[in-house]
Image (spheres, rainbow, N blue to C red):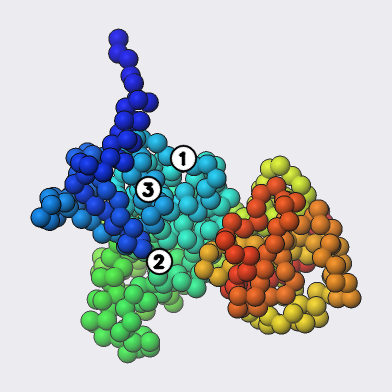
Amino acid sequence: MSIKFFDKLSQNFIELLYDKDDYNVIVEVENEKSFTAHSNVLKCRSPYFRKELENIIPNENNIKKITKPTISSVIFDIILKYIYGGIVNFENVETRFIFDLMITANEFEIEELTKKLENLLIETKSSWLKSHFSLVYRSIFNGNNFKNLEKFCNDIIAKYPNLIFDAEDFASLQESALVSLLKRDDLQLEEVIIWEYIIKWGIAQNSTLPVDLKEWNDENFTTLKTTLQQCLPLIRYFHISSTDIWKKVKPYKKILDEQLWEDFTQYFMAPDEPVKSIILPPRSILIQELPTRTTELIKPSSAIITYEHVAEISSWIDRKSSTYSLTNTPYEFQLILRGSINGFNPQTFWDICNGQANTVVIVKVKGTEEILGGYNPLIWDANTVDDGYGGSFYMYSLSSSFTLDNSCACYDDGSYEKPIRTAAKNNFSIVDYEVFKIIKKTN
């Protein structure tokens, strides 16, 4: 029989952390904030610190110094308390803070804490993960340690590939992220479209390649082949039509193995005869009609929100405790105004929205990845200056005037269940804003 006294042990180690007499490590973080620690504890709890401390020469006082200028002092304080006491307090913290803590824990190779936070986000903060999808997706492939989050994101992208493949920054997608998607048997894109995206991505990685394919030489093709060496084996070539092989694949024949091209010829002439190349299975079709690159997330497409957001906002409008499924959303979101197209002048808003009822306003905040919004079930009236359009229906509080500078405001008078924003200042700048007419679908 054994008796465990972890609580007291944790308390004693936390006391050791604050003991300034015997430390032999100083860690300097953001804004030159310094923390003292003990090398044996750090090395025992973190492979990162073990490797780092072995390569640092101590000063004349036998103190080793580590500098991490990009890490928040608040986050590092929590990391240290976890290292010493095994305790992390999540009371009154934003989801973004938990996400940043997870990224930092991974940087310090603290696997237990990283995995715990990863699973916590998936199990309890999935809505936040979806609304900050780009940030999350581009953060989790550094080091390839977030397998559960990778699956969470790829499950979404497999169904809605346009989220990534049609994104403006698709060319900057990490190779490991792209490869993980190509391995999916349920990626809902036609194989020839996948081929074209891969070629587009590969060319974008090499800015010196000629724009006109007719000007390419053998060295150019070799460069593209080398860039795509992890991607090319994952294309389901034998599930591309012969017409598309001829029109879309043949121009890049030189990046393919000679044997593969010979097998193409044989396969289309005598499909029952065996070939030497590996034939990957076709991707499974989860929906009746595969999306092409022209499919829009919302018609007209939104530059801010996705189908997941539409389902969630629709649930809020109907005051449902659970979120509508993506195939059971009862409303259509018809875009009637976008700041980046129609302009940010307040008069433009009133020219377009005056007299409109049942509208949702969506705002993307500059520099924070926040998406704010409000639902107004009543008619916008340019002659009425009162803010109280069905106040109980508002999901968020928004100004009806939008500018790109620091002139937007969001005020909470305490009538909401949760704070609308946790930023220190009410004023903020925006990247863009959109107004949607909400239309009930008819069966």
What residue would you read off at disc 2? 173
Q: Residues within 10 Å of mark 2 (few under 14, many from 20)?
A: some
Q: How far apart are the two marked residues, 1 and 2, measured between alpha carbons?
A: 34 Å
Relative to residue 326, is residue 140 drawn left or right?
Answer: left
Relative to residue 178, is residue 442 drawn left or right?
Answer: right
Residue that appears at 24% across and 82% down: 218
What's under tag 3, amino acid-wise?
Answer: Asp
Q: Residue 109 appears at what percent x and percent y?
A: 29, 47
Q: Residue 161 appears at what percent x and percent y?
A: 52, 61
Residue that appears at 51% across and 58% down: 133
Callouts 2 and 3 close, C-beta under 8 Å: no
**In front: mark 1 or mark 2?**
1
What residue would you read off at disc 3? 77
Asked if one can make out residue 25 in the rendered structure from this viewpoint, the answer is: yes
- Who comes first in sequence, dot 1 or dot 2? 1
The correct choice, above or below, for 383 with respect to 2 in the image is below
